[in-house]
Image (cartoon, grey):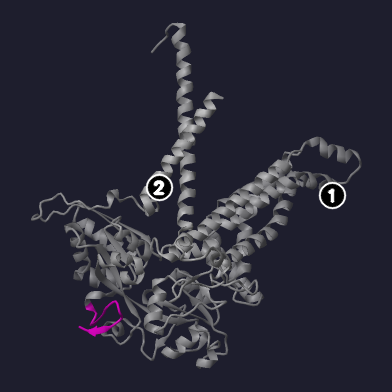
Amino acid sequence: MQFRKSWIMALALTSVVALSACGNGGNNAATNNGGNAAATNTQNSSGAELSGSILASGSTALQPLVEQAAEKFMDANAGVDIQVQGGGSGTGLTQVAEKQVDIGNSDVFAEEKLKDADAEKAAALVDHQVAVVAIAAVSNPDAGVDTLTKQQLVDIFTGKIKNWSEVGGADQAIQIINRPASSGTRATFESFALGTKTDDLPGSIQEDSSGTVKKIIGETPGAIGYLALSYLDDSVKTLSYDGVEPSVDNVISGKYPVWAYEHMYTNGEPNETVKAFLDFMMTDEVQTGDVVELGYIPASQMQVSRDVAGTVTTK
Amino acid sequence: MRVKPKKSRFEKHHIENFIGRAYMSFCVLLLIVIIVSMVYFVASKGIANFVSGEVKVSDFLFGTKWSPEADTPSYGAFPFIAGSFLVTLLAALIASPLSICAALFMTEIVPGWGKKLLQPVIELLSGIPSVVYGFVGLSVIVPFLRNTLPGQGIGVAAGALVLSVMILPTITSVAADALASLPQNLKESSFALGATRWQTISRVILPTTFPAIMTGVVLGMARAFGEALAVQMVIGNAPFVPRSLFESASTLTSVITLGMGNTTMGSPQNNALWSMALVLMLMTFVFVLLVRMLERRNKI
């Protein structure tokens, strides 16, 4: 009996300790520990030798590019260790704002995710736009439509137009394949293609993964959705927007408006190692090599630029 | 430390005993601490929206409008709760008869090769990763439903079908264990009274093992309720209570997996997702309680 009592006491005590530890930690408990996050630069500042570790997390759309560039960067700088994790744009922004990672990758401007109470967190972040992703409306190949106007797209995504015959296509009910409300791709499509936020419609299908979206659109009669240019192939029909074909050239010249930057955020100005890596992302080697190879559009070649409010200026 | 007087030998096995006990206690303590802190963490994040007054509990549980990104956001999670229960119950309805028959086949009808054949198959089923189930569902079940039934194939029915295959092994193995542990003399007495095999199974074996079989069904439902990936791939994820079985709907798990990475920690939308996680966790407790109650009834 004596033994059992002390057991229970011990249990209760440890639980209390654990709980209070949790309480102090706030919402850090679910995230990475920051131990390896802090990049340390032990080398003399004048030397070319870089060292330290860089931890990046966030957007899964940007992850392949950062990973591939990181491989090259690590080959050239043996002392540097770069880890790239996914998790989504929201996760990346949260973690970089709380200094748990060095770089937060995001599909959207930080101000769009960190707002209201978190607005000052966004103000501390420094934006590095490394690539551009353009998004095209796509349909099932049997829909029989080549181009849609902005108004037609709005009517389709708000449920006013329900059949492809109303926009000059086959007599086939329209099936919307959307993204979840929190998705960066959806935010881009709504801001720059539709110009308005849309409510979800009953019966619409929502998927987050571009691969799944493409598969469903390709197989479902009458399906419409949107995909990044790098995902387009013959299984789906790419629709022109107001008569403008979604091509890399049209995006670079600013004719095709449905595109967004891929951002790599740092909290304050980056340290030497992180800065070197971000500079490397903007070199021609990466911009005209890996960026193009992986289906993104080089940020350095864009002839127009856009700020967080959506105002486009010609460079 | 070689042979020593009697006394030290005696001490040695005491020491072993002590080390063993200390190690075990440490492991158990660690386990308890982990569980308690996880429950605490989910609960504290889950109630954050209600504490701050951002969302009312009743609006969350019974609100039918989920539009977190609208200018006046609303966080009604009823469509997801309803969707979770709907697919779980449907999956259990489809899977239970199949699993119970499979278990009877293995233990009563052809215990020899039936067990040899079915056991590995069922173990294999339970080992397949859920993403594979989801992909098979998307590539096989969805086109099949689209071509034979109304709707686009994607929807509640597809989700329930995929889930029912996923919970088959759980129910079958629990039911088979229950049937195998039935005292042989019960069956022998029944046969001795002149009952046929069918009479024995339907009047003696099934009623006696019913609570144990139900334990399997509840465990299967718990798995179905918590399954995220496979369901998310085939159910369509529209945030609405479905009007038919062939319409796109969402479950708690699917909306959490779709939204968690895209939202920032501490935002109301993120907290609403944690509230759903809390609902999921509470449901798991309910399932565990149910299993406990059934086990208590399961004394033969």
Q: Which residue is mark 1?
A: B198
Q: Which residue is mark 2?
A: A22
Which quarter of the picture shows residue A72?
bottom left
Magenta region: A301-315
Q: Is residue A304 magenta?
A: yes
* Residue positioned 39% across, 61% down in the render: B266
- Left or right: residue A92 compared with residue A180: left
Q: In the rendered view, tell whether residue B126 sits above or below residue B73.
A: above
Percent across and percent down for residue A157 are 48, 83
- Left or right: residue A224 compared with residue A72: right
Q: Is residue A271 magenta?
A: no
How far apart marks 1 and 2 lie (CA) works out to 58 Å
* Residue positioned 48% across, 40% down in the render: B31
Percent across and percent down for residue B291 are 65, 47
Residue B121 seen in the figure: no
Q: In the rendered view, tell whether residue B19 sits above or below residue A116.
A: above
Secondary structure beneath disc 1? helix
